[in-house]
């Protein structure tokens, strides 16, 4: 049993006809899927999917790219959404200085607010961190709350151990199937602190690279872990799923 901890099934092209993707995921042994959000609309969609499918769980939040559009009442809306039994996290939230789609001060403000909500309500966070290591760490440290999954991890080994020591977890996408630098990084990390994800529709793994990604393909990420750690894929599935179940409380 595999758990895709990051699948954007609340976005196009998935949302209008998600059933085939769910079916292929189940056929591949993917029995749990976490659907993160980027704004209020996708948060509502994530909850709608979680209501419809037993194996889907929702995360609600505002992505740094969308932080300029955050409404004044977004935190109170999310607070109500957290009462839904299948909302398991706040995310994806964080900072992105690589694309720079939103001013840094707005990204930080929106990030801080969502961290405080997560801390106050005791929810884990799905953190997007791109080219923003110093500020991401400083803001989490300031809040004294590292109950976080650093998704689609793209920072270095030193930063990985820095956040792991604070209690955070890390997940990798299909990049681990073809990027030697990422494979070498994963090799240095404790398996019990890792999860797997697709970040679909992006980041498709080998042998699907260049195509649209989907939850069924998270098995290839697990297969890469299996090769890196020299452990049976069944063991990788069990360890990463148990970690996800514990982290997301699902």
Image (tube, rainbow, N blue to C red):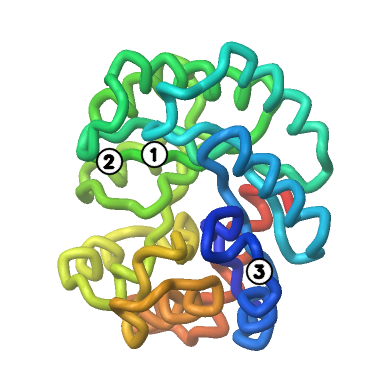
Q: How many marks?
A: 3
Q: Which element type, helix, strand or loop, lies under badge 1?
A: helix
Distance Cα–Cα, label 3 vs label 1: 38 Å
Q: Few, some or many C-alpha atoms within 10 Å of disc 2 (few <14, some 14-19, many ≥20)? A: some
What label does residue 136 carry, if any?
none
Residue located beneath label 1 in the image: 165
- Identify the mark nearer the N-term, 2 or 3: 3
Distance Cα–Cα, label 1 vs label 2: 20 Å
- Identify the mark nearer the N-term, 1 or 2: 2
Q: Few, some or many C-alpha atoms within 10 Å of disc 1 (few <14, some 14-19, many ≥20)? A: few
- Identify the mark nearer the N-term, 3 or 1: 3
Q: Is residue 184 above or below residue 246?
A: below
Residue 237: give x, y in percent of width and height: 56, 76
Residue located beneath label 3 in the image: 18
The residue drawn where x is 21% and y is 43% is: 158
Q: Which element type, helix, strand or loop, lies under badge 3?
A: loop
Q: Is residue 120 visible?
A: yes
What label does residue 130 carry, if any?
2
Q: Is residue 110 above or below residue 212?
A: above
Q: Residue 114, located in which quarter of the rendered image?
A: top right
Q: Nearer the viewer, residue 92 or 38?
A: 38
Q: Residue 49, located in which quarter of the rendered image?
A: bottom right
Mark in the foreground, 3 or 1:
3
Q: Nearer the viewer, residue 200 or 219?
A: 200
Q: Is residue 125 visible?
A: no
The residue drawn where x is 28% and y is 20% is: 103
Is mark 2 in CB contact (under 8 Å) with mark 3? Answer: no
Residue 101: give x, y in percent of width and height: 28, 32
Mark in the foreground, 2 or 3:
3
Q: Is residue 109 left or right of residue 12?
A: left
Residue 212: give x, y in percent of width and height: 41, 73
């Amino acid at each position: 049993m595999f758990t895709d901890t990051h699948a954007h099934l609340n976005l196009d092209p998935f949302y209008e006809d998600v059933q085939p993707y769910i079916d292929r995921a189940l056929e591949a042994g993917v029995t749990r899927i976490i659907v993160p959000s980027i704004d209020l609309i996708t948060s509502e969609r994530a909850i709608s999917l979680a209501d419809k499918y037993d194996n889907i769980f929702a995360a609600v939040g505002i992505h740094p790219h969308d932080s300029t559009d955050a409404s004044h009442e977004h935190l109170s809306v999310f607070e109500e959404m957290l009462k839904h039994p299948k909302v398991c996290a706040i995310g994806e939230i964080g900072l992105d200085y690589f694309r720079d789609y939103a001013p840094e001060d707005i990204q930080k403000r929106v990030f801080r607010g969502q961290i405080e909500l997560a801390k106050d309500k005791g929810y884990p966070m799905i953190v997007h961190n791109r080219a923003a290591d110093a500020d991401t760490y400083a803001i989490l440290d300031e809040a004294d709350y590292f109950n976080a999954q650093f998704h689609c991890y793209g920072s270095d080994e030193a930063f990985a151990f820095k956040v792991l020591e604070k209690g955070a977890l890390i997940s990798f996408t299909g990049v681990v199937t073809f990027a030697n630098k990422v494979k070498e990084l994963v090799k240095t990390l404790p398996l019990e602190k890792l999860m797997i994800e697709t970040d679909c529709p992006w980041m498709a793994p080998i042998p699907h690279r260049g195509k649209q990604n989907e939850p069924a393909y998270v098995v290839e990420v697990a297969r890469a872990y299996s090769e890196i750690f020299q452990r049976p894929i069944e063991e990788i599935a069990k360890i990463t799923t148990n970690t996800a179940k514990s982290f997301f409380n699902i």
